[in-house]
Amino acid sequence: MITPDILGDREALALPEGSSPLLTVVVDTEEEFDWDAPFSRASTSVDSLAELDRFQGLCEEHRVSPTYVCDWPVVTSELGQQTLGTYLERGVCHLGAHLHPWVTPPHDEELSSHNSYPGNLSPDLEREKLERLTIAISERFGHAPRVYRAGRYGFGPRSAEALESLGYAVDVSPLAGFNLSADGGPDWSTLGPEPYRFGPNKALIGFPATGGFSGWLGGGAQLHKALHKPLPSALRLQGVLSRLGAFERIMLSPEGYTLTHMKRLTRALLARGTRLFQLSLHSPSMLPGCTSYARDPQERDALLARCADYLRWFREDVGGEMAALPELPQLLRSIPLTKS
Ligand SMILES: [Zn+2]
């Protein structure tokens, strides 16, 4: 099973002492597909991009430059090129790459849940798909992508090597605090939300999607470990603690989480010293009916309102500022080793 160990040696990074909390925004920009149906190479519709202006407009209103990590069907579609090309020309967003193996050539792997996580593919096939996607983005948009998110948070043991060789600088693949191993994905439950330098040549900055635990028990590593042992007693304990509000796993996203959840997670992490945050969502949530988070126009509008409310709260109440993911290499510093 894939765990944070596959990231190799990690050097802790942080914002310079005294700087304000920073929020980054990333959108998994991808085709609409039915998560309950088997994976299909034919599900490549990107109609939801016609609604992306709603989100981009909101970002501009709140002075945020989001990073759209784009997958193959988006990059190769006319609507994708038009929509994102316009934002890029106006200088109001950044592009990155997002790999959904089942719709990205070469189509050499068998379709399965296991193979839907790019890091589970053979290193050669993962690299080739990533290279094709990288070239497609460079050719169509005139900029080589420097930010990557693996589809389904599926980073693998050789992903860093491929990213370094293709010129990437920032990886936002892992999802801090979540275990996705039930259908073959990585177990990121012991990974925190802080950034780190990593890769065979230490050329990459890793910055997990912000997730973690809130509640009165907080996020002690020992507790996480105890709760993630695959024992029935640990699962029962987790259930009881979660019902008591002692222990709650939250991703910083308007998808499936309320504004209260998002604020609660942010406060809990701020209290533990976290100052760099990442708000994540998926482009298909812009078109009602495409995701379970926005089944109708009311739910879609409520999702957008949660984003706007959170951005406002982060700036006004937290006193935070906005940053773009490609800026991270300039913003982050190594944490000096403290002498004991
Ligand atoms: Zn995706």
Image (tube, rainbow, N blue to C red):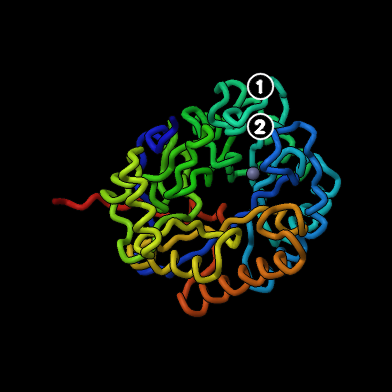
- N-terminal of the pair, mark 2 or mark 1, is 2
- Dot 2 falls on a residue whose secondary structure is helix
Q: Which mark is residue 44?
A: none
Q: CA distance from mark 2 to mark 1?
A: 9 Å
Callout 1, which amino acid?
Glu
Q: Which mark is residue 109?
A: 1
Q: Quadrant of the N terminus?
A: top left
Count neighbours of disc 1 (C-alpha within 10 A) and say few if under 14, some if 14 to 19, many if 20 or more.
Answer: some
- Dot 1 falls on a residue whose secondary structure is loop
Query: In which image quadrant can residue 56 be found?
Result: bottom right
**Quarter containing ligand 1?**
top right
Q: Are marks 2 and 1 in contact (CB under 8 Å)?
A: yes
Q: Position of residue 201 (x, y in %)?
A: 43, 33
Query: In which image quadrant can residue 115 be found?
Result: top right
Name the residue: 71% across, 64% down.
300
Q: Is residue 170 visible?
A: no
Q: Position of residue 60 (x, y in %)?
A: 69, 69
On screen, residue 13 versus residue 311, left or right, reads: left
Mark 2 sits on what residue? 101
Q: Position of residue 292 (x, y in %)?
A: 67, 54
**Mark 1 within 8 Å of ligand 1, using the beta carbon:** no
Is residue 71 or residue 286 the one in the foreground?
Answer: 286
Q: Is residue 195 visible?
A: yes
Which residue is most to the right?
78
Callout 2, which amino acid?
Pro
